[in-house]
Image: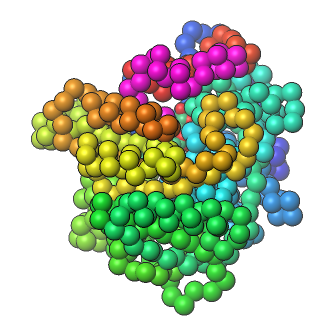
Amino acid sequence: MSPFAEYEKKKGEIVEEFRKNARENGTFSLKKDTSNLFRNRVNKSKKLDVKRLNRVISIDPVHRIAEIEAMTTFEDLVNETLKTQLLPPVVPELKTITVGGALVGLGIESSSFRYGLVHETILEIEVLTGDGRVLICRPDNEHRDLFLAFPNSYGTLGIALKVKMKLIPAKPYVRITNEKFDRVETFFARMHELCAKNRSDETHSYIDGVIFSPNEQYIIQGEFTDEAPYLSNYKYLNIYYQSIRQKKENYLTTLDYIWRWDTDWFWCSKHFGMQNPLMRLLFGKFALNSKFYWKIKRLVFVNPIVKALVKLFEKPTESVIQDILIPIQNAAEFHNYLQKTIAVSPIWICPYYVYNTEEYAFCQFDPSQFYVDFGFWDMIPSTKPKGHFNRLIEQKADELNGYKSLYSDSYYTEEKFWQIHSKQAFLKVKHKYDPEKSFKDLYEKCVAR
Ligand SMILES: Cc1cc2nc3c(=O)[nH]c(=O)nc-3n(C[C@H](O)[C@H](O)[C@H](O)COP(=O)(O)OP(=O)(O)OC[C@H]3O[C@@H](n4cnc5c(N)ncnc54)[C@H](O)[C@@H]3O)c2cc1C
């Protein structure tokens, strides 16, 4: 059977199951093997098993377009595209993030200063809507409204079954340069200058940064090359983020560059003892990957016995897991606020310019504005009421015209949430494509507990 015929068969089974169960009360959620969500709820929704939609259907190297089943992980997608020296323009850092998850959840990476967020590289989405229809949505057809509403909708309007994605040419290696700074103002100004310059020229394909402290920051630039004088390896005993401080120049295979943050979940592997050389030696071969960390973390969140044990031995903490896009002119102020309130380190900084100027309904960024994403994922000691620090950060981000990603816990009031994400626009598409509420609404799903 051809990959396309196989897709049609799997799609038929899933749609049939959906329509059959839609008659029962309650909303649907997706049954998948992996996730990268950090919102902890008791999920009573009906589960729709969509795991099998996990294959790349075709890659057209001439027009540089991939047709992909939406639960395909970026790891599998990149393995396929690299066979013809192509890559998705934006590959989120964690191997298990799926094409559909990044589309509905605003995927970002170090190429986002040039190609925007993942959804800006998507050309077409085939959607199973809440009312049981299967629709092809494109910016130029009658379902343009759903196409534009899908990014940042987190599965509240329908399920992406298949997408068409633009691809870009790649080379076998990436040369990395790490430039050090000792003031955040200078660091952000230089990042702005570099991204504006490289936005359309082809030299530096990747730019991101790490803030280790108010006195130590790095801009990391990546450039495709055909040859490499040597190659570093950060998949086992050595740790990528530490190399940024140690080396001014470095070379990785393109595949290793793409997954450089996955091995140590940026730097969060420290919480699992995996930055200890002995632990790495003993368990590194199977434990050094984001899938493993997420499973352990999930176990601590959901298993009542493990939860109780952790509570018994651990001091009270608040988990502060956030990605927040801030306009560059407010970046230094936001950084200083984070230092004052939660003092987490390191912080990942990922630059972003709008690439596709379509008017996406739930993620409207200003095309003339340069943004930086602050990624910080940590547990901080706290005896304050639940969500205290997250609330402070949400308020500050809002004051500075920032935008907080919804994959982790949020504490907005319903009123505030709908000021940020137009309620009117949401209800309009919701009524049209999911009038009986087969899926939760955006506030219910992303904030309410
Ligand atoms: C520690 C951490 C760091 C992160 N860092 C980054 C980063 O650097 N770059 C980045 O891009 N992202 C990052 N993320 C966020 C991640 O991209 C989003 O959480 C994304 O939505 C996860 O995709 P997933 O495939 O794992 O989806 P899931 O976690 O399985 O699902 C996420 C949401 O999307 C919905 N959904 C999933 N698939 C579909 C579909 N096919 N159709 C409709 N709805 C669907 C689900 O219902 C759910 O609400 C990070 C997350 C964490 C926890």
Q: Looking at the picture, does residue 90 appear above or below residue 36?
A: below
Q: Nearer the viewer, residue 216 or 75?
A: 216
Residue 5 is left or right of residue 21, and the answer is right
Please count the marks in the image. 0
Q: Nearer the viewer, residue 242 or 200?
A: 200
Q: Is residue 100 left or right of residue 328?
A: right
Q: Is residue 9 visible?
A: no
Considering every residue shown, the one lying at the far bottom of the view is 229
Task: Residue at 38%, 60% (x, y): give it.
Answer: 184
What stretch of residues is rendered in magenta? Answer: 405-430
**Residue 96: where, in percent of width, then height?**
52, 50
Find residue 132 and report its horizontal and vertical position in percent: 73, 20
Colour scheme employed for the rendering of this structure: rainbow
At horizontal 32% and vertical 49% (from top left) the residue drawn is 336
Image coordinates for residue 285, horizontal then vertical, percent = 38, 67
Q: Residue at x 50, y 51 (%)?
A: 328
Nearer the observer, 163 or 71 = 163
Query: Was residue 235 drawn as part of the magenta stretch in this picture?
Result: no
* Image quarter hosting the C terminus: top left
Q: Quadrant of residue 159?
A: top right
In the rendered view, would you say 378 is above or below 279? above
Asked if residue 63 shows in the view, the reply is yes
Q: Is residue 429 magenta?
A: yes
Up the image or down, 232 lies above or below 7; here it is: below
Residue in the picture at 57% in, 31% down: 154
- Asked where in the image residue 71 lies, by quadrant, the reply is top right
